[in-house]
Amino acid sequence: MIPRKLENIVTGALNKRKAVIILGPRQVGKSTLLKTLFGNDQDIYWINGDEQDIRSLFDNATSTSLKAAIGNHRYVVIDEAQRISDIGINLKLIIDNMPNVQVVVTGSSSFELSNKINEPLTGRKFEYQMFPLSFGEMVSHTSLLEEKRLLKHRMIFGYYPDVVVNSGNEKEILQNLASSYLFKDILSFDKIQKSEQLVRLLQCLALQIGSQVSYNELGQQIGIDSKTVEKYISLLEKCYIIFRLTSFSRNLRNELKKSRKIYFYDNGIRNAILGNYSLIENRMPSEIGALWENFAIAERMKKNAYEKAYCNIWFWRNKEQQEIDYIEEADGKISAFEFKWNPNKKASIPSSFEKEYSSDFSVINPNNIDRFLL
């Protein structure tokens, strides 16, 4: 198994009388991580929320019935917990009435699981996010040189574990992920039944990475209203398929204040949605630039999440079309970044931004990507 950043983090959170919650999309390795941590330990009670008979154990459960089910097990591991009704209340019963039992929970839909656990588990949980493999994890597994050599490959096929370890079968695996697992949870919630609209929306978003997105325009292309577009995008984001950047604006009257960009957590999923796995060399420069931007920002998101690097993130643009790809603010310090696939391409900070805001500015290309992601 490729070592995961969360392994040491989760290990350090155990046995502190709090539930450990691991959120992330399906197939990123949550179950594998738990099996690595706990192995075949007989002191563990494993529960799979995808199984109907298991879910029934929690229907109208009491502390007495839960104690009887758990018995003398020291650890309770609940996989795909978003499928269990009233999971938060059940976890609270375990934590409050069985203080010597450590509960570890995974879920593939942050919006569903978080809604069920946040209030009941206030002050009773540690919560972490897990993503597809990261640039940093792969560098630790192989080497920086090897991972830089594979950048073109990663920009097309991404970092899902099954994709990474099954060289030569990337297309088949990604098509299966994009057509099955991505929609398994989202289509079961909120009475979303028109999966073709969801697929068309994702295709439109995949063609617009790195560009500003209009909900009205998307709705017109797909045949739904802008409020439904926004609702679908919110659900897709909470299922860890996409994420949004909003525009940075504070002082300048000509700054765009309500714009947003949308990126995919994994380049491979983006390309699978479009059914386009053509080599980097065969793509238009504008698309290469967009793929590079998506790759770099998504990997930075993973890095910040694993390191608990608390910061605000945006992009910036004004009405004169001056733009900065990515901005972070941490502890009052602003850092601005431009992404260029071609190391020979130059970029400078827009004069209006530089005049108004004190910031560091960097251009990120394949030669220095390690400084941004490690």
Image: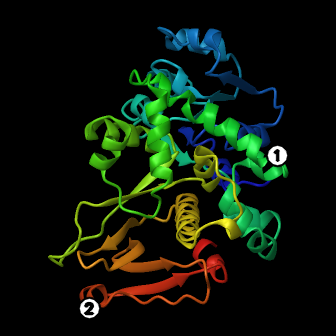
Rendered position, 291 above or below 44: below
User: Mark 2 falls on what kind of element?
Assistant: helix
Q: What crowding class fits label 2: few (fewer than 14 Cα within 10 Å), some (14-19), or many (20 or more)?
A: few
* Residue 79 in the image, given as x and y percentages of width and height: 64, 29
Q: What residue is shown at x 49% (from left), y 85% (from top)?
A: 362
State how the image is colored. Answer: rainbow
318 vs 56: above or below: below
- Circle 1 — which element? loop
| Residue situated in front as seen by the camera: 365 or 7 | 365
In the image, is 319 to the left or to the right of 243? left
Q: Quadrant of the C terminus?
A: bottom right
Nearer-the-camera pick, 235 or 371: 235
Q: Is residue 293 left or right of residue 254?
A: right
Front disc: 2 or 1: 1
Q: Residue 293's spot in the image, x, y percent?
A: 53, 68
What residue sits right under mark 2 in the picture? 355
* Relative to 225, 63 lies left or right: right
Q: Height in image: 276 above or below 121?
A: below
Residue 96 appears anywhere in the view:
no
Residue displayed at 69% across by 36% down:
176
Per the rendering, the mark at residue 169 is: 1
Three-letter code for the amino acid on which mark 1 is drawn: Asn
Q: Amino acid at mark 2?
A: Lys
Q: Residues within 10 Å of mark 1 (few under 14, many from 20)?
A: few
Residue 279 visible in the snapshot: yes
